[in-house]
Amino acid sequence: EMYRRHDNSYGGRVRVCASPSTASTTSLQALEFSRDTARARDGIWALHLSETPGDRPASEMSAVRFLDSHGLLDSRLLLGHCVHVDAADIRMIRRGGASISTQPVSNGVLGSGIAPVPAFLQAGINVGIGTDDANCNDACDVLSDLKTLGVVQRAVNCYAAAVTAEELIEIATLGGAR
């Protein structure tokens, strides 16, 4: 009903997308439905992924590996957070063509950790920025969160150019648009 009533409304400016919570709390059938709906409607689907160490739908593999093993990583998928990922996960995300939305302030407020944004960028993954929502961010100020992203990445990587000003502007503009 949401798709029927609202998707592509206001001259195509409003889009509806399936957004199951996490891979570890959503059935494989619902994840596949979300992917298939995005494909059929020429849209995207979104999923919080690896925000916490416990986000493992199958105990023997990471959430990224789980998605990859079921053909769910594709260019229509927007992954939120991706804090607890390793080099193999990053390669799979890149190979699948998924994008990442990083939420540095939300991850800090919740004590989730720090996403390896420089590694995402080096791998050629499209990265945007989000605020998550007010209950885990205390505000929804994307410019403030963008500054936090840059400062935190520089601090944790002990490198002032870990994420450059140009990269931050691209994350906030083109990264989100893509």
Image (spheres, rainbow, N blue to C red):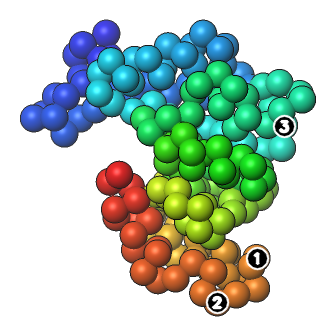
For the point 33% across and 18% down, which residue is it? 40
- Marks 3,2: beta carbons within 8 A: no
Horizontal arrangement in the rendering, residue 95 relative to residue 57 (left or right): left
For the point 37% across and 23% down, which residue is it? 39
Residue 130 seen by the camera: yes
Please name the residue that numbered disc 3 is placed on: 54
Judging from the image, what secondary structure is the residue with disc 2 in?
loop
Residue 112 seen by the camera: no
For the point 10% across and 35% down, which residue is it? 11
Mark 3 and mark 1 lie on one chain; the one further toward the N terminus is 3
User: Quick one: label 2, few (<14), some, or many (20+) residues within 10 Å?
Assistant: few
Q: CA distance from mark 3 to mark 1?
A: 22 Å
Please name the residue that numbered disc 1 is placed on: 156
Please name the residue that numbered disc 2 is placed on: 160
Q: CA distance from mark 3 to mark 2?
A: 31 Å
Residue 2 in the image: x percent, y percent?
32, 16
Residue 62 in the image: x percent, y percent?
79, 37
Mark 3 and mark 2 lie on one chain; the one further toward the N terminus is 3
